[in-house]
Image (cartoon, rainbow, N blue to C red):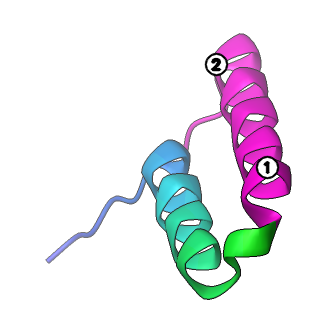
Amino acid sequence: MNLHITLAPLISLIAGVLILLMPRLLNFIVAIYLIAIGVIGIFGIRY
């Protein structure tokens, strides 16, 4: 069985968990998430 994980959903999952654990960092986590997704979109990073 092969499991293919793409980068964007993995980043979303990590950001969601961090927001649940540390709600005070919401703005910081959202900013990093948006930057990461933007970089992935521009450069087309895929695994």
Residue at disc 1, secondary structure: helix
Give me the residue at 79% from left, 49% from top: 27
Q: Is residue 40 left or right of residue 35?
A: left
Query: Could you say where residue 6 lies in the image, as x and y percent from the top left?
Result: 45, 49
Disc on res. 41:
2
Give me the residue at 80% from left, 66% from top: 25
- Say if 35 sits above or below 16 in the image: above
- Say if 4 sits above or below 2 in the image: above
Residue at disc 2, secondary structure: helix
The reply to whether the magenta stretch includes residue 36 is: yes
Please state which amino acid type lies under the numbered disc 1.
Answer: Asn
Circle count = 2
Q: Nearer the viewer, residue 3 or 23?
A: 23
Q: Nearer the viewer, residue 34 or 39?
A: 34
Query: Which residue corresponds to mark 1?
Result: 27
Q: Nearer the viewer, residue 39 or 31?
A: 31
Query: Could you say where residue 34 lies in the image, as x and y percent from the top left?
Result: 71, 33
